[in-house]
Image (cartoon, coloured by chain):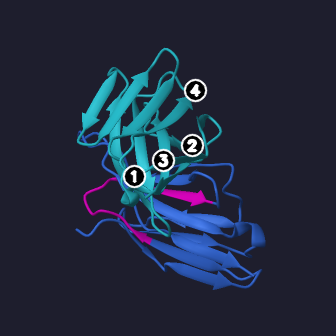
Chain colours: A cyan, B blue
Amino acid sequence: GEDVEQSLFLSVREGDSSVINCTYTDSSSTYLYWYKQEPGAGLQLLTYIFSNMDMKQDQRLTVLLNKKDKHLSLRIADTQTGDSAIYFCAEESDNNDMRFGAGTRLTVKP
Amino acid sequence: DTGVSQDPRHKITKRGQNVTFRCDPISEHNRLYWYRQTLGQGPEFLTYFQNEAQLEKSRLLSDRFSAERPKGSFSTLEIQRTEQGDSAMYLCASSLVGQGTYGYTFGSGTRLTVV
């Protein structure tokens, strides 16, 4: 996952917004994804954005894509304790290979 | 369909033993992937199949590792002569390429501990 970088930790208070950032390097990426991993579990697809979009909103989740800077962010509104998990950014190339970042551990404090 | 299933969930083995893991993908998915995840890291690509054909293998996949998907359905990943460095979570994922669906569906993983 060395081509996809994320900060390792984020801590927020319940009810606040969380913003998780990611940078990627492959300008030919067609889709970018956010996955969530809870302890002892596999990765769960949260949302994705096509590379020709700037923003996608899905309930409490907002994805922003700055293709020029190769920067992707995930905003979680009204963060809840159940949102505590590791969040992975992933880029998919045009041959469907997927590369993951190292993950951002989100801790939500009550 | 109940998603991607992996078996076993946990495996503890002695160094030098062989282990085999199984993955049952979502039945209509044509691609199956194996990833390895170590503590504090994201998943690292090992190999993938399109139907029964193994199309790509990572350099991480040493000659002690072999994967099969004989009938284009379930897959097995075998590690021969296990080493302590093989201790990791082995994740399987599947996807349907070319049909307008996006992303991978992951199984819960097999956690391997080599002692």
Magenta residues: mostly which secondary structure? strand
Q: Which mark is residue A101?
A: 2
Task: Verify whether residue B52 appears in magenta.
Answer: no
Q: Are marks 4 and 2 in contact (CB under 8 Å)?
A: no
Over which residues does the magenta segment extend? B23-37
A54 relative position to A67: left or right: left
Q: Are marks 4 and 2 on the same chain?
A: yes
Give the amino acid type for the residue marked by disc 2 in the picture: Gly
The chain holding disc 1 is: A
**Viewer-nearest of labels 3 and 2?**
3
- Identify the residue under disc 1: A14
Disc on the earlier residue, 4 or 3: 3
The chain holding disc 4 is: A
**Viewer-nearest of labels 4 and 1?**
1
Q: Closest to the observer: A51 or A61? A: A61
Mark 4 residue crowding within 10 angstroms, few (<14) / some (14–19) / many (20+)? some
Instruction: Give coordinates of residue A108: x percent, y percent.
Output: 46, 54
Disc on the earlier residue, 2 or 1: 1
Instruction: Name the residue: 39% across, 37% down.
Output: A75
Q: Which mark is residue A25?
A: 4
Quadrant location, the C terminus of chain B: bottom right
Q: Are marks 4 and 1 in contact (CB under 8 Å)?
A: no
